[in-house]
Image (cartoon, grey):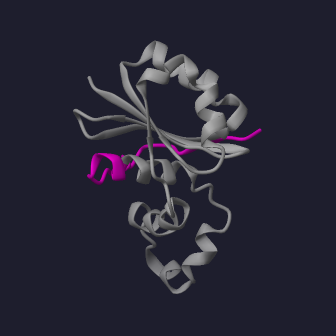
């Protein structure tokens, strides 16, 4: 199995997506506090066959990459310009509005969403030049407490 981690780094929180490239399947999509990122990636690397970690070059990426120095040779830094903006649009591709909710402006649905995991997905999709879909049963977890 060939797995990749994609990270949308941030000052306070990071989006992270774990993908099985051979199956084109997203195994995990989470948003976690930046302080938990190194330990979480280290744990994932110990139980999964991670070949590369893709990190967006945006906000605080240098600091986050430094914290991930234990896997430095496996890190690929990619452009992440406008991923948060693009994540708002991608959110509705992944989670389409149905029923009468369709009449409500889309902005209402994205106001309180942590889009960092979707931003990490976009970073991955840009790197692989391919679109992935979230399984219907996946739980986008947020670990901010």
Task: Identify the residue at image location x=44%, y=62%.
Answer: 95
Q: Residue furthest right?
A: 145
**Where residue 102 appears, x then y in whole percent?**
48, 81
Q: Which stretch did the figure color magenta?
A: 125-145
Task: Identify the residue at image location x=45%, y=52%.
Answer: 79
Q: Residue furthest top?
A: 46
Task: Identify the residue at image location x=45%, y=14%.
Answer: 47
Q: Is residue 77 magenta?
A: no
In this rendering, the answer to whether 78 lies above or below 70 is below
Q: Describe residue 5's horizontal placement relative to residue 33 as left or right.
A: left
**Where residue 80 appears, x then y in whole percent?**
49, 54
Q: Residue furthest bottom?
A: 103
Quarter in which the C terminus is drawn: top right
Image quadrant where residue 4 sits? top left
Closest to the observer, 27 or 46: 46
Q: How many marks?
A: 0
**Where residue 58 appears, x then y in whole percent?**
58, 51
Quarter in which the N terminus is drawn: top left
Q: Is residue 131 magenta?
A: yes
**Where residue 134 appears, x then y in whole percent?**
38, 49
Task: Identify the residue at image location x=36%, y=18%.
Answer: 49
Q: Could you tell me what secondary structure mostly forms the magenta stretch?
A: loop
């Amino acid at each position: 199995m060939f797995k990749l981690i994609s990270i949308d780094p941030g000052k306070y929180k990071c989006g992270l997506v774990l993908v099985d490239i051979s199956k084109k399947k997203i195994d995990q999509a989470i948003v976690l506090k930046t302080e938990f990122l190194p330990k979480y990636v280290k744990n994932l690397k110990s139980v999964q066959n991670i070949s590369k970690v893709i990190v967006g070059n945006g906000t605080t990426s240098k600091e986050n990459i430094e914290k991930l120095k234990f896997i430095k040779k496996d890190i690929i830094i990619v452009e992440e310009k406008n991923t948060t903006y693009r994540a708002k649009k991608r959110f509705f591709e992944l989670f389409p509005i149905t029923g009468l909710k369709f009449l409500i402006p889309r902005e209402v649905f994205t106001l309180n969403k942590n889009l960092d995991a979707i931003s990490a997905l976009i970073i991955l999709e840009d790197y692989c030049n391919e679109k992935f879909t979230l399984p219907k049963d996946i739980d986008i977890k947020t670990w901010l407490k």
